[in-house]
Amino acid sequence: MAGGAAERRRGARQKIALPFDEHPADAPPGPDSASGAPAVAGALAAPRWRVALVHDWLTGMRGGEKVLEVLCELWPQAELFTLVHVPGMASPTIEGRPVHRSIIQYLPLATRYYRQMLPFFPFAIEQFDLDRFDLVISTSHCAAKAALAPGRARHLCYCHTPMRYGWDQFDAYFGPERMGRLGSTALRWVMAPIARWDRATAARVDRFLANSRYVAQRIHRYYNRVSSVVYPPVDTGFFHLDRSERGTYFLVVSALVPYKRIETAIEACRLVNVPLRIAGDGPELERLAAIADGSVTFVGPQSADQIRDLYRGAIALLLPGEEDFGIAPVEAQACGRPVVALGRGGALETVIDEVTGILVSEDSVQSFADALVRVQRQPFEPGVLRTHALAFSRERFRQEMARQVDDLMSAPRDASRW
């Protein structure tokens, strides 16, 4: 049994031959810090460049914002540009930046219905004046990577994923079962030019960084660009072990959006008759609440302290959708809790099957329910789970980002684009 676990660990860390350059941080991670003081060996000891950070929107504190938060720590003098900003919804580190908002901000009800204003995003993102900056760092899953950097500047894009609803996940967001046949057909006509724009504007980026090998494949498929993998930062100093006894409920920590497939978690927990708590908010809340029974509790958006307590009290974290990376599974493992995840996408890089969780091979409610039964019966060693999570620490992310930026800024112009 121990030998089999060791083989799974080795297999989980094997590299996959892909058409991009990967720079995983294999060195043991240093101690994490939630204070924001970057512990990067001299690379960014003083301001060296005028830096602009471009982010899609600031309406909450999810995985993309946790990446942005560390970038704000690394470049404390940077200015922040975003399509829409709801003040107070991000961390103090982010809120302390000078924030430049797009024209979307000033449209009626924009802070609530900004997603419906997608057709205006291409125009809005191109209006930012970045002429005074030497380095533009975009953190993008939608439009941020299309920001127009001046010709003398370098543009590094940390890509969470190419625009999902413009490419392979259109049906999950806008399929006939959600929008009706007529509405879905109309939206295909709307999305087609946006997808062409998304592909064309990839040429504005000097260097792509992907948040997982899975996303690097997507960048190559849709943008025909190579990228390096730099895994997102997880605050393993804040998320840590506190209790060893098994929890009493399953947990979902997620934005409530279609591709997360949270209905699968709801139905699977109903089948095995175990309580489920769902932390997060989003446009799917009303639909999900309508199919949930009394064993499902929607706890809404939670503070970091509350999320940590939820992890510690859970049997396991559930990840029923195909994730690009997924910070929540690593946070749960840092707290000593296993993960039950669909065995696709980023979960293949964050969860070691039968060692730090269970990977479900078939995308069905019954298969997921069977995995919930298994995870309750199988012992998982919290220390092993936490050790695995440490490979995704904030300190490792700082070091990788500093190295990538130094390399980009020192490279000859012709060598900077790959």
Image (spheres, rainbow, N blue to C red):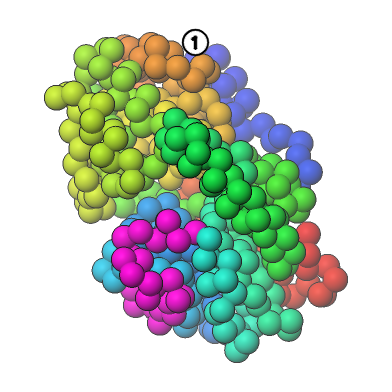
Q: Nearer the viewer, residue 375 or 253?
A: 253
The image quadrant where one finds the C terminus is bottom right
Farthest residue to the left: give it: 294
- At horizontal 18% and vertical 33% (from top left) the residue drawn is 297
Farthest residue to the right: give it: 414
Q: Which residue is mark 1?
A: 1
Q: Is residue 26 above or below residue 365?
A: below
Numbered range of the magenta stretch: 92-118
Q: Is residue 200 left or right of residue 111?
A: right
Q: Is residue 394 left or right of residue 383?
A: right
- At horizontal 59% and vertical 20% (from top left) the residue drawn is 7
Hey, what amino acid is under mark 1? Met
- At horizontal 69% and vertical 75% (from top left) the residue drawn is 154
Q: Is residue 151 a member of the stretch shown in magenta? A: no
Element carrying mark 1 = loop
Q: Nearer the viewer, residue 70 or 219?
A: 219
Image coordinates of residue 303 in percent, x first then y, are: 23, 53
Q: Quadrant of residue 9?
A: top right
Image coordinates of residue 182 in percent, x first then y, are: 50, 38
- Quick check: can you spot residue 356? no
Task: Classify 10 Å Cα crowding around label 1: few (below 14), some (14-19), many (20 and above).
Answer: few
Q: Is residue 119 left or right of residue 385?
A: right
Q: Nearer the viewer, residue 20 or 287?
A: 287
Q: Is residue 197 above or below residue 249?
A: below
Q: Is residue 200 above or below residue 351?
A: below
Image coordinates of residue 22 in percent, x first then y, are: 70, 48
Image coordinates of residue 226 in percent, x first then y, are: 75, 52
Q: Quadrant of residue 406?
A: bottom right
Q: Quadrant of residue 113?
A: bottom left
